[in-house]
Image: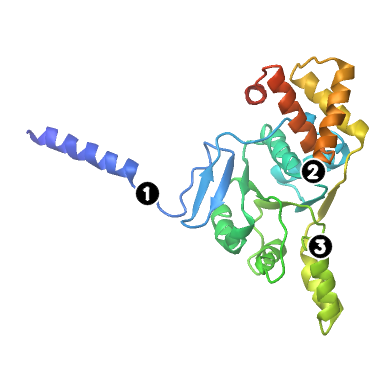
Amino acid sequence: MSHNEGLLSLIRIADALERIAPKPQGHFDFEKTDAFIWCPNPQFLKPIDSINRINIDLLLGIERTKETLLSNTMNFAQGYSANNALLWGARGMGKSSLVKAVHKKVQNEVQTLKLVEIHREDLPTLDLLLDILRKTSYQFIVFCDDLSFAKEEHNYKTLKAALDGGVEGRPKNVIFYVTSNRRHLMPRDMIENERSTAINPSEAVEEKVSLSDRFGLWLGFHPCSQDQYLEMIRNYCDFFELKPDPDKLVKDAIEWQQTRGSRSGRVAWQFILNLAGVYQTNIEGILSKK
């Protein structure tokens, strides 16, 4: 083997080893993907190539809330002042769907906006995540879905400190969006128990509920009426070009929600998935193209 051939072989081997070697801790490629899931052990931001979300125009019955969160997110993405947001209220009314839809809407205009989801059990490692994000030139919505805390849990203190900013301060390129079925993120019986058993009831309760006060935006989601429920379904039918008989559609939709024992945006969506199957329509395929 000649000297040049040996040198080329060494270069190829070095390139191959570099490709398969784990990237150094703290190295993340934010250019290729718009959304990530935080995995703390080892420290890794898992890229999400296909985000599970629907078009923002399909979220009905929450127009004022949608407008408020969209405006807040656009302000943040453009470098203006914005609030952390707590989306709370009725199950299945589009809290997490709105966060993901708003991110997509704003990201179409401001490409530097990224979405990072952190799971409740990983909140103790939030400081590690923020240390990574603050060193980049991108802007991040840190999103925690379906958040609530049980008795004896102390993870809320980590989030509370991050919202306050602490000595170092919250990174200017990070905003927190949290969804929960509970306005104060704590079960009512837990709050009442603190009030009844503590030496100083008001201080004990204040410690538990003050977390939600750290969010500048409280956006409430309430159960929908039957008219709103049917409007959602008709809007879905128009969007996906399903053309059932109008009277039969209403009858079937009402029967569907009665069998579920609830009426919400989620129930409307599940009805449409069933209807699309009858019409042999691939909803996921349509969404991926729009």
| Nearer to me, 225 or 139 | 225
Q: Amino acid at mark 1?
A: Pro
The x and y percentages for residue 183 are 82, 57
Q: Which residue is mark 3?
A: 213
Any part of residue 94 in sight:
yes
Q: Quadrant of residue 102?
A: top right
**Residue nearer the viewer, 134 or 64:** 64
Left-right relation of 70 to 248? left
For disc 2, the marked residue is 69
Query: Which quadrant would residue 195 be assigned to in this image?
Result: bottom right
- Which sits earlier in the primary sequence, circle 1 or circle 2? 1
Q: Are marks 1 and 2 in contact (CB under 8 Å)?
A: no
Q: Which badge, 3 or 2, comes first in the chain's sequence?
A: 2
Label 3 amino acid?
Answer: Asp
Residue closest to the eye, 247 or 34: 247
- Picture disc at residue 22: 1
